Image (cartoon, grey):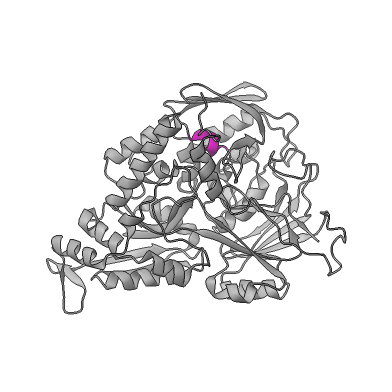
Amino acid sequence: MTAFPDFRSPRWAALSALLTTSVLLTACGSGSDGSGDDSGKPRSGGTLTFAVGSDAGCVDPQQVGSNESIYSVRQTVDSLTDQDPETGKIVPWLAKSWDINSDATQFTFHLRPDVTFSDGSELTAQVVKDNFDAVPKLGALGTLAQGYLSSVKSTTAVDPLTVKVTFKEPNAQFLQATSTHSLGIESSASVKKTPQQKCSDGVIGTGPFVLKQYVQNQSITLAKRAGYDWGSSLWSKKGEAYLDKLVFKVVPEAGVRAGSLQSGQVDAISSVGKANEAALKGGQVTLLRRANPGVVFGLGINNSRPVLKDVKVRQAILAAVDRKQIADAVFPTGTKPATSVLAHTTPDYTDLSADLALDAAKAKSLLDAAGWKSGSDGIRAKGGKKLSLVISWFPNAATNQPALELVQQQLKAVGIDVTLKQNQVSQFATTLQGGDFDLVWGNVTRADPDILRSSFSSKLANFYRLPASSLDTALSGQAATTHAAKREQLVDEAQKLIVQNAYNVPVVELQTQLAVTKKVHDLAFDSGSRIQLHDTWIG
């Protein structure tokens, strides 16, 4: 029995149509500027300069959670498997094949031979074991990887090219987890470093590019890996990458990024804002878009805060948010308001738009019922204390502040006073871990619904301080079953429990929107709406 959905089923086929707008998005150009091949065929060489909006302060793929940093560091490591963004199917990469037992407690991977790290050391089963054994020690920044390996019992090197991962309980999500950057394979030398050393110095990987220089909050420079010959089975080019060099420059201002692209100072930019779309459309620029699967952008609630322990207060916040106004006013064209805690591109998504409809009257009624009465200034109070909350946020996307300013206005309209507190991007994980927040703005991208368990199970990291409840049962159950229909039912139940109890306030689906010049070809989105640059070329 397989440990992943039946990708041949009608349900999955329908979902696959939603999973991506385009597997491979190509900026068409004739190369008339003289730098390309007149035949239009891919050519090797050149440097791609990419402007991103922020830096997570870390260049270890296993510890990075911000898309702006994942774009670069993902290129330095390969994974055991890959996931087709069009079909959702898991396909070979560093592992040429795998076996899964009937209850999904044991996964055996057969590695490709002759794979080496950029320091010359060989990829072996022992190296994979070293990686997985070290994940629990990554600390606050390694929560994604830790979630994927939760309940692991042992990792065993059966022979030099066979590694077996055994779990204490069924773990159907693990195969997809092996396709993520968070479980990208690093050399034994890198694994032995402290998490802090890996963040600041980078790691040795088997990937198509090698880290050459990292200047925090300024740039990340990568160079092509000579002799690379073990790319994902999804890639069109065999062997080495086309590009010689990748430079990721940190440019926080969206308008400056757009201007740099138009002037030819950079070849691609991330996080294209709504205000810059019109200027970038047409001419020598192409906009590329794809909705991110996983937990949507929204307000993560610290459910242990005295005020927020009251379900009526949480439900009032949920009802007071006008998601469509935020999506239309702030985010790029085509961005969808949240209709569940999961994005619609996530397997087993359930449409809960009725539960997430704007209803200010309901919000006010709930606050009345909870004992919060309006004061002369319109802000509610109870027992002499005003209903005041702080939303912590991080400047890793240009849309964050304007979106939250609208949320602030919408909550004020029902009597909730909101203060916006900006933190450094590098503080995101430690803020969650420390628990010193009321609400926090963020999302988590993953093309598997088990992201709900990683984010909301009270049995795991439980950053949002949820109480033990029937939600845990649903989340544990979906991770344990190998039956697609049963898993779908449990994921559906989990989404409903999260939304109806307002453990989280979904607001808007994250849509990745990039802009590239016409000379950039074959820049591909992966299944998580991040980018793969092995097949990318300039001409």
Please tell me which residue is depicted at 62% across the width and 55% down the height of the picture.
71
Inspect this view and state whether residue 457 appears: no
Please tell me which residue is depicted at 84% across the width and 62% down the height of the picture.
36
Quadrant of residue 422 in the image?
Answer: bottom left
Quadrant of residue 194 in the image?
Answer: top right
Q: State the residue in front, 174 or 340.
A: 340
- Picture coordinates of residue 303 (x, y %)? 28, 52
Residue 145 vertical placement versus 58 (above, below): above
Residue 272 vertical placement versus 122 (above, below): below
Q: Residue furthest bottom?
A: 376
- Picture coordinates of residue 324 (x, y %)? 40, 66
Please tell me which residue is depicted at 48% across the width and 35% down the height of the picture.
173
Please tell me which residue is depicted at 50% across the width and 34% down the height of the picture.
5
Q: Is residue 361 left or right of residue 194?
A: left
Query: Does the segment drawn in magenta span residue 184?
Result: no
Q: The C terminus lies in which quarter of the figure?
A: bottom right
Q: Is residue 95 left or right of residue 309?
A: right
- Picture coordinates of residue 315 (x, y %)? 25, 57
Q: State the residue in front, 40 or 438.
A: 40
Q: Is residue 28 left or right of residue 362?
A: right
Query: Does the segment drawn in magenta span residue 174?
Result: yes
Residue 118 vertical placement versus 258 (above, below): above
Magenta-colored segment: predominant secondary structure:
helix
- Picture coordinates of residue 262 (x, y %)? 69, 74
Q: How many marks?
A: 0
| Magenta stretch in the rendered image | 173-178
Inspect this view and state whether residue 117 appears: yes
Q: Residue furthest front?
A: 10
